[in-house]
């Protein structure tokens, strides 16, 4: 087979993503999000997400196929995220993918969501080089990976021990009375705040953490520190400056993310850093990553946001790469694995 035409399905969280690629060429990338439905709960509700996927899948497939200008029967393979993610949400996508593959008589590829984020970089049309360190930060995950080869050598260096980075933004926004999703709100509020107004803790960054948790993250201590600071200031009758708290909180998160990512580059002698996940939309994160990476001689890659947030194109892109390297398809017996390792 030359360049395979692949349809990818992504339903690991609250985005129903359908993407179609030919080889490394992006043909369409349709995303339907149930984020609005989760807003009143202040976070993603698994069953609400699963039900939303069930309703959104068919129209999303139709619009992705139309946009790509292909016939569904022409796809060479179907790809789907089998984990990690929310089990119920994953199951909806997997069920649809199996039905589609069987009815079309085409092979099915079950792929890893995190490796999919790394594959997003292949669809930018630019030359991609390995090894690279990858920092993936979203509402569902915060992972640092060492990618020597996309197809068969991706190593998880570390991940969050508690909240994901995006989740931390969402929780702090709630404390500050800002709406969900909190990331963009905090980013906006922080623009006029002083990042050095309050020194919030950087999780797992002490010398004593380096032996076991050098590349791991923890945001729960930071969350508690912000909550306590706001509580004490309020009790003391002081006015809480939302911009200052937002900027200081954002600085703590960004500092720890960039420091650990560049430490991974230095210690593994890798001069490349790939960023992915919805939190990459954060202006300060991009700024600090680019600035500090340049000083460290590390080249930073940030795919367009539509490929950074959860999407089906990255899943199709990864499967396309697996096919081109001769990987056999999955048997139909696989299920959802919410903690699937890379
Ligand atoms: O990758 P993504 O779209 O999807 C899931 O995780 O499902 O990421 C969404 C997360 C949310 O937690 C949101 O608050 C966060 O990314 N986010 C941001 C920003 N924009 C979105 N976090 C920080 N700064 C932003 N500008
Ligand atoms: Zn993701």
Image: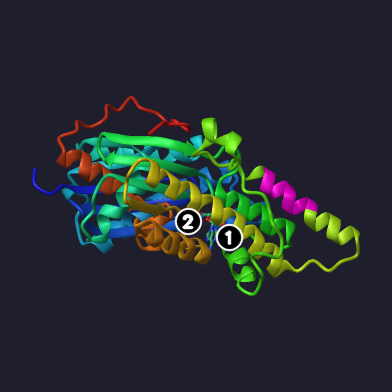
Question: Any atom of ligand 1 within 8 Å of the CB at mark 2?
Answer: yes
Residue 96 in view, yes or no: no
- Residue tagged by mark 1? 183
What residue lies at 47% left-to-right and 56% top-to-bottom? 278
What residue lies at 66% left-to-right and 43% top-to-bottom? 220
Dot 1 surroundings within 10 Å: few (below 14), some, or many (20 or more)? many
Dot 2 surroundings within 10 Å: few (below 14), some, or many (20 or more)? many
Question: Any atom of ligand 1 within 8 Å of the CB at mark 1?
Answer: yes
Secondary element at image label 1: helix
Question: Looking at the image, is mark 1 or mark 2 earlier in the sequence?
Answer: 1
Is 26 included in the stretch rendered in magenta? no
Q: Magenta segment, which residues?
A: 221-228
Q: Is residue 177 left or right of residue 268?
A: right
Residue 106 in view, yes or no: yes
- The Cα–Cα distance between marks 1 and 2, rounded to whole angstroms, is 9 Å
What residue lies at 56% left-to-right and 45% top-to-bottom? 164
């Amino acid at each position: 087979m030359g360049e395979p035409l692949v349809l990818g399905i992504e339903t690991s969280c609250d985005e129903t993503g359908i993407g179609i690629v030919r080889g490394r060429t992006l043909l369409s990338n349709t995303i339907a999000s149930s984020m609005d439905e989760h807003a009143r709960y202040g976070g993603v509700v698994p069953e609400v997400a699963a039900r939303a996927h069930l309703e959104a899948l068919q129209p999303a497939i139709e619009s992705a196929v139309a946009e790509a200008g292909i016939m569904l029967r022409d796809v060479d393979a179907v790809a789907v995220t089998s984990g990690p993610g929310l089990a119920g949400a994953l199951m909806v996508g997997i069920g649809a993918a199996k039905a589609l593959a069987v009815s079309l008589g085409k092979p099915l590829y079950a792929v890893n969501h995190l490796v999919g984020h790394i594959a997003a970089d292949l669809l930018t049309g630019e030359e991609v080089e390995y090894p690279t360190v990858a920092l993936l930060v979203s509402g569902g995950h915060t992972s640092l990976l060492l990618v020597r080869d996309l197809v068969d050598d991706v190593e998880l260096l570390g991940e969050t021990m508690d909240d994901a980075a995006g989740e931390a933004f969402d929780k702090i926004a709630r404390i500050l009375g800002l709406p969900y999703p909190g990331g963009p709100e905090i980013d906006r509020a922080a623009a006029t705040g002083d990042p050095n107004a309050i020194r919030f803790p950087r999780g797992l960054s002490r010398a004593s953490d380096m032996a076991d948790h050098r590349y791991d993250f923890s945001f729960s201590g930071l969350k508690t520190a912000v909550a306590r600071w706001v509580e004490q200031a309020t009790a003391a009758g002081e006015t809480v400056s939302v911009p200052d708290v937002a900027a200081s909180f954002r600085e703590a998160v960004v500092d720890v993310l960039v420091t650990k990512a560049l430490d991974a580059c230095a210690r593994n002698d890798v001069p490349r850093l790939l960023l992915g996940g919805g939190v990459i939309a954060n202006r300060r994160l991009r700024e600090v990553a680019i600035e500090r990476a340049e000083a460290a001689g590390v080249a930073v890659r940030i795919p367009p946001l539509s490929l950074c947030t959860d999407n089906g194109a990255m899943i199709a892109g990864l499967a396309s790469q697996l096919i081109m390297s001769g990987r056999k398809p999955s048997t139909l017996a696989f299920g959802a694995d919410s903690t699937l390792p890379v």
